[in-house]
Image (cartoon, coloured by chain):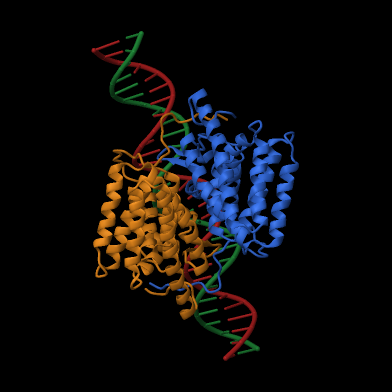
Chain colours: A blue, B orange, C green, D red
Amino acid sequence: MDSVAPDKLEQEKGDQGLRVTPQPMRRQVEEGLRAAIIAGRFAPGQHLPDRLLCELFGASRSVVREAVRLLEAESLIVVLPNRGPFVAWLSSTEAAQIYEVRGVLEALAGEGFAIRATDAERAELRAVYERLAAAGEASDRTELLAIKRDFYAVLLRGCRNPMVARMLDQMLNRNSQLRATSLSEPGRLPHTVAEIRRVVQAIEHRDPEGAWEACRHHVKRAAAVAVRILREREERDGTPYGREA
Amino acid sequence: MDSVAPDKLEQEKGDQGLRVTPQPMRRQVEEGLRAAIIAGRFAPGQHLPDRLLCELFGASRSVVREAVRLLEAESLIVVLPNRGPFVAWLSSTEAAQIYEVRGVLEALAGEGFAIRATDAERAELRAVYERLAAAGEASDRTELLAIKRDFYAVLLRGCRNPMVARMLDQMLNRNSQLRATSLSEPGRLPHTVAEIRRVVQAIEHRDPEGAWEACRHHVKRAAAVAVRILREREERDGTPYGREA
DNA sequence: CGCCGACGGATTGTCCGTCAATATTCCGCC
DNA sequence: GGCGGAATATTGACGGACAATCCGTCGGCG
């Protein structure tokens, strides 16, 4: 059994370089489906027959099924035996657990950023924060979500730990629908801005412990709001997953 | 676009109950392949042509490819475009990053166990620890690895947080080969036992903070040993992945 | 009237054969 | 001996086919 090791091949994904060959079809389906779920274009709990996905993406069943398998591993899709794929949904307890994990990962990312990021990256983070602070209550949700997405993009890049980035990214994807609702909670925005400011300030002072605490604090607050909303919704209409189109 | 939610279906995996229907072939391939990689039956960096996997598991290409996709999402397999799947390998810096993530997750698990585990589970954990303490230097690696696997099984069950369990399980799988080498480091075992004892004691005292610190400390120590060994190995033979049969 | 069971449609799980695109190997040629 | 190109192997993707399973419906029966 030979174990020939590929020579100068990188397994990192960051170095696709100047590669011009198109992504394989599978990736396109995978990314499209992931984006659609994260954006809430499919309702949680919705059934996704592979025939539907086939004609939606214009791909064959093999490709669709492989993409579904990947998203299943990310817990964005749940595959029931002999029933097929469903869009994953969250109960309030699951959401609380996710926030718990997200808290420590985000703290780790903040700490790493404070230690290892470049000055340019610090400035970038500050700039994103300023955009958030400038966005008043008037801004719509999509604007706010975009800013927060950018914030995390900078944070995950600057923390210099692809593993943290991968895991935290999964967590953020997993509760992306929730973030939309918790961000739109009336009166929540000023608190969010203040919490993020603490993170940015700690990072600018190169204070890893401070960044750690600020991140954990922020996630803890966000979790409290999101879980409360989710629990209220569950009490109101009995089902843990939405039914909006 | 209807979004009919399946009624009392659970998406948790823990409740397969008394289900007697055989797992789909795909799961068998997936689990077999995962187990083989974790056990080190394939060398890191080894190429796994799907034809090989097909006749190895007696399955068709579709099944094999879907299983590979899942393991790709777990980072146990790396798929190079137009080259196919390879067994993932670790550089010393990647290993360090994994240990960093594993540290906070394990701390979170320990904390959760201290807070939420039942008395029976505490006793179980203590029992596993006693087995570890009893196993002298004489024991072979497979025995030690089995005990540690049991330890983590109890820990992940008792922490009452399936998300932490999933993530941490992935991390443990990812560096399973490393654990074998770091456990067999001469003189390391007594330290390991002492570190684990601190974890168990803190949990028995229902001291979440103590458990947190003890877990982080244990992982930090294990990381130091593993990364050092890996770095030495890289310096010695230049390649970050083994070539043993 | 309501429950139970059989039938039929729909969907998944799996396999197979085919074809194009790409990577690897090897061989002849200069 | 090095180089270029053909031959081969492997992946990426497609579509059809078939059995097994699940779901809803309909009809029979107590």
| Residue at x 38%, y 68% (from the top left corner) | B182
Residue B108 x, y percent position in the rendering: 45, 49
Residue A23 x, y percent position in the rendering: 62, 56
Examine the rendering and report whether any part of residue B11 can be seen: yes
Residue B132, located in which quarter of the rendered image? bottom left
| Residue at x 49%, y 57% (from the top left corner) | B101
Q: How many marks?
A: 0
| Residue at x 42%, y 44% (from the top left corner) | B162
Q: Quadrant of the N terminus of chain B?
A: top right
- Front-lying residue, B190 or A245: B190
Q: In this view, does B130 lie to the left or right of B157?
A: left
| Residue at x 30%, y 39% (from the top left corner) | B19
- A52 above or below A211? above
Examine the rendering and report whether any part of residue A86 can be seen: no
Q: Is residue B88 left or right of residue B40?
A: right
- B55 above or below A81? below
Residue B36 x, y percent position in the rendering: 36, 61
- Front-lying residue, A112 or B237: A112
- B172 above or below A44? below
Residue B32 x, y percent position in the rendering: 36, 56
- Front-lying residue, A40 or A20: A40
Q: In this view, does A177 lie to the left or right of A193?
A: left
